[in-house]
Image: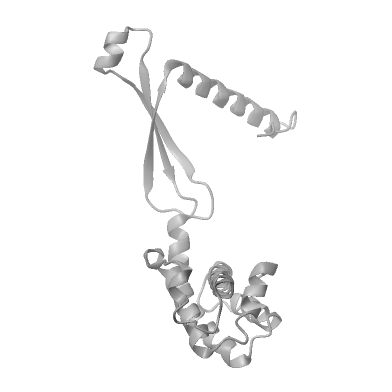
Amino acid sequence: MEVPEQHLQGLKMMVHMSEMSFRAIMKQAILEGTDSSQRQHVSSLLATCSDCDAPTVRAAHAALLASLVEHARHAPAAADTAGQVLLRDALTAAAWPHHRQVVLMEAISQARGDTRSQLASIGHGCDKLVDIGWRELVTVQSSLAGPGSPEFELTLVTRATAGGDTRERVLTCSREQLQDTLTALRRAGKALEMFSEGTAALPER
């Protein structure tokens, strides 16, 4: 698990803080990593972490939350020790004392399943297009405007990269916008066809 420098610094800031501050920040980070509805502003920790200033609390909280998420990503199964080794190496690099490493490792291991469920619910990338539909909208306004200005409704059915239920995204557009969309899709399809044949590269976005 590669730890960004800013998060490594946040972990280092926890080495000398009091046990009360350490456990309060750890508890809140794990709570937020396993249940997104429990997210609170970091300032809520300042009263408990009386020996730390606000920047220290923010950095430590962000570092622990990132460590929890990265551990869950690298340890898909409870018996997977690779994620534990990577996390332990990161804590050692931050000069954490052994007893605090043990406390955090146990807490994060217990939270791994719920954290992975949270990650699955939001996905790890863009949604995948499953289906698309369209229909012409007939409204009072479009009827009064005449036959030359209809509106269309596009329905995009998508599914998160991690799987799960599908969801619909409904868009409305004019005839011109629909034609522009179809033209863009045809160009993308043509470019993809040429790319697969090795005759051209995909156009830059």
The colour scheme of the drawn protein is one colour
Rendered residue at 37%/50% (across/down)? 165
Rendered residue at 42%/32% (across/down)? 132
Residue 149: image location, x then y, percent: 37, 12
- Looking at the image, which residue sits at the far right? 199
**Looking at this view, is 46 or 121 the one in front?**
46
**Looking at this view, is 154 or 93 the one in front?**
93
- Looking at the image, which residue sits at the far left? 140
Residue 179: image location, x then y, percent: 49, 18
- Look at the picture and state if 101 lies above or below 132: below
Residue 118: image location, x then y, percent: 44, 63
- Look at the picture and state if 109 lies above or below 143: below
Q: Quadrant of residue 59?
A: bottom right
- Look at the picture and state if 157 lies above or below 106: above
Q: How many marks?
A: 0
Rendered residue at 59%/79% (across/down)? 84
Q: Quadrant of residue 144?
A: top left
Quadrant where the N terminus lies?
A: bottom right
Q: Quadrant of residue 87?
A: bottom right
Quadrant where the C terminus lies?
A: top right
